[in-house]
Image: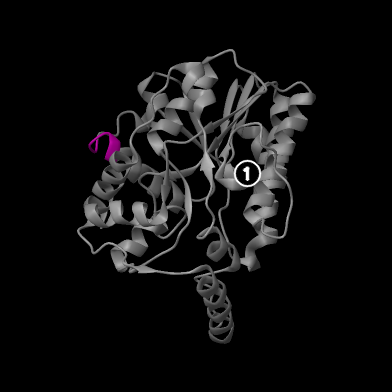
Amino acid sequence: MVQLTEKGYKVRAIYRNRRSLQETKKIFQYYHHNDISLWDRIEWVEADLTDYFSLEEALENVTRVIHAAAMVSFNPGESDKMMAINSDGTANLMNACLVKGVQKVCYVSSISSLGKQLDNALVNEEVEWQPDSRRSAYSHSKFRAEMEVWRASKEGLPVVIVNPSVVIGPVNWKRSSGKLFYSVKQGMPFYTNGITGFVDVRDVAKAIIILMESDVLNERFILNGENLSFKTMFTLIAQELHKKPPFIKVSKPLTELGWRINLLLCFIAGKAPAITRDTARSAQLKSFYSADKFKNRFKFTFTPIQEAVKNTARWYQINQ
């Protein structure tokens, strides 16, 4: 929204509750040094992905839609809720867009909805998702959401999909990728052999606007700044937060044991597990993602992840 308002677009945005709206406003102010003049240009409408009729009302006279709303959870107890929001909610929004004659939709998906490659080969847009026992409920929900978007495209809705890797930027540090920073701030001595992609949130916003302003339709694009090991990523964060980098390597067998013990202890205590099967296994996976399609098509240069980490760390230092 920051970049959309800066470019002079008339923006309507939906929110579910006032608390989330206030959190978003704080991030907006961070990028504009407490100047809320552009914030006041946004028209805010209360709506919910699970409420179809609220979406129809929100889309009145709207020509283009950026769908970035989703629930991110690796807690097994929240799988059904996540599926209802991410998959069924996307179906509701696509149907409402069709009814209201929306001219173009950009769906913000995830690398979790892409396939896997053997021997650490690069994953690109052509690697298709395949179900297996190691797929998280989040991965299933995002894949099914994409199927709803492609279904709507077959029914006449112009769409484009972006698949960001792990998005790094200002956010509530106890949610989503913010947990990486929170864990390091609390003192994170452990690291695993896992490798994945990371991307600056500002690059994701720029890419979405580029695609929405282009004539590109019915294609997907991976958005990825760099492929980094979790050890490297945690070290970058630790340096910016002036904390000790991780120094204890955790093996795959130990992570498998750890999530089981944690699940048992949390069950006894009646708490949500801090470590789940999905998070433990993803921490050991080595996945490499290619954003060459987007970079070559639009001559785009992604921000170094070290700069993304610095930007996010500054946000934390201001708002702690």
Residue at 36% from the left image edge and 52% from the top image edge: 233
Q: Tag 1, which secondary structure?
A: loop
**On-image quarter of the C terminus:** bottom left
Q: Is residue 183 visible?
A: yes
Q: Horizontal placement of 91 versus 249: left or right?
A: right
Across and down, in percent, residue 226 comes to 41, 39
Q: Residue furthest left?
A: 242
Q: Horizontal placement of 48 versus 252: left or right?
A: right
Q: Is residue 161 above or below residue 70?
A: above
Q: Main secondary structure of the magenta part?
A: loop
Three-letter amino acid code of the residue under disc 1? Gln
- Asked if residue 70 is among those painted magenta in the image, a careful observer would answer no
Residue 281, located in which quarter of the rendered image?
A: bottom right
Across and down, in percent, residue 105 comes to 62, 26
Q: Is residue 50 visible?
A: no
Q: Horizontal placement of 295 versus 245: left or right?
A: right
Residue 215, located in which quarter of the rendered image?
A: top right
| Magenta residues, start to end | 30-34
Q: Is residue 238 above or below residue 91?
A: below
Residue sitting nearer the eye, 144 or 36: 144
The residue at which mark 1 appears reads as: 117
Residue at 57% from the left image edge and 72% from the top image edge: 256
